[in-house]
Image (tube, rainbow, N blue to C red):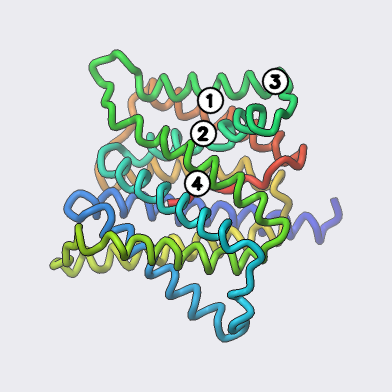
Amino acid sequence: MNPTHRHASLQGIGFAVLATACFATLDTTTRHVSAGLSVLVALWFRYVIQALITTIVVWPGRGRQVLRTRNPRFQLARGLLLLACGVLAFTSLKYMPVGEFTAISLLSPLVITLLSAWMLKESIRPLRWLLVLGGFVGTLVIIRPGSHEFDWTLALPLLLVLANAGFQILTSHMSKTEDPITTHFYTGWIVTVLASLMLPFVWQMPTDGVVWLQLLLMGLMGTVGHFFLILAYGRAPAATLTPYMYAQIGFGVLGGWIVFNHLPDQWTFVGMGLIALCGALGAWLTVRENRINIQPPET
């Protein structure tokens, strides 16, 4: 690798790690806010802020060009899937620690492997099946069904994994014909509009100034995190960046410890490590085979 490419790759890795820090901060703040605020209200604030910031940044340079799309139905479907992901993620964070939630939600690349085998009739190598099995074993170690520590709310991030896998597959399909900035613009506003339709039934006006600041932080972290991802993928290939996305588990554990004084027990750490190892290797193989461009789970 020549020095120029090496420097660009290092920059890309740096931006990718910054993105995971932003997403972990978003998740930690979401868990704190959702303790006293409706999930849908928090979700609405998170996406309306992202949609407004995206519009302010993109519209002056692109104008109406940003509205041009070949697949409006796919744009709507992507928005619906992201809304489902957001509701499941915010609800999960209301009941479970950030680190554990992050680890389970990062099963998405492994689930995409299963969906590819089932829906696309793709041939899956034995090593890939072994990685998928390892990831699910890690999940079982975390949630420990049948133990006194098991809580059925831990099934919520598993539903999130399924919704996010569908979201990723659709995103990969759309990337062949759609401008990513246009897709990002539409998705933010579609989720905002859909959440707004439900808002009258769950509305709670935040009365604490700290809560307002946290809601603003959620919107900023989501927007800045995706901006860092764009910069990262512009400087390094996905095969280089994907393993570093699992740094989000570490940031999630750190956030849970700083804000909630929670540290996972030793077995949970083992499960999280197994998911990170199998997920990173599986995602790397997926990208190397050019099957799908893996992205972090959306929240």
The correct choice, above or below, for 296 with respect to 100 in the image is below
Say what amino acid the circle numbered 1 marks: Gly
Q: Which residue is mark 3?
A: 127
In three-dimensional space, the C-alpha distance between marks 1 and 4, rounded to whole angstroms, equals: 16 Å
Q: Residue at x 46, y 65 (%)?
A: 188
Where disc 4 sits, the SS reads: loop
Residue type at numbered disc 3: Leu
Disc 2 and disc 1 in contact, CB within 8 angstroms: yes
Q: Which mark is residue 297?
A: 4
Crowding at label 1, few (<14), some or many (≥20) Cα neighbours within 10 Å? Answer: many
Label for residue 135?
Answer: 1
Mark 3 to mark 1: distance in Å?
A: 12 Å
First in residue order: circle 2 vs circle 1: 2
Residue placed under numbered mark 2 in the picture: 107
Mark 3: secondary structure? helix
Tag 4: residue type?
Answer: Pro
Report the disc number at residue 192.
none
Q: Position of residue 250 (x, y in %)?
A: 45, 41
First in residue order: circle 3 vs circle 4: 3
Residue 109 pos. (x, y %): 58, 36
Give how far apart the Cα atoms at labels 4 and 2 are: 9 Å
2 and 3 marks in contact (CB < 8 Å): no
Query: In the displayed structure, would residue 138 be above or below residue 87?
Result: above
The spot of residue 105 in percent (x, y) is 45, 38
- Residue at image position (69%, 48%) is 238
Distance between the alpha carbons at the discs numbered 2 and 1: 7 Å
Asked if the residue under mark 2 is in contact with the one under mark 4, i.e. CB atoms within 8 Å, the reply is no
Q: CA distance from mark 2 to mark 3?
A: 16 Å
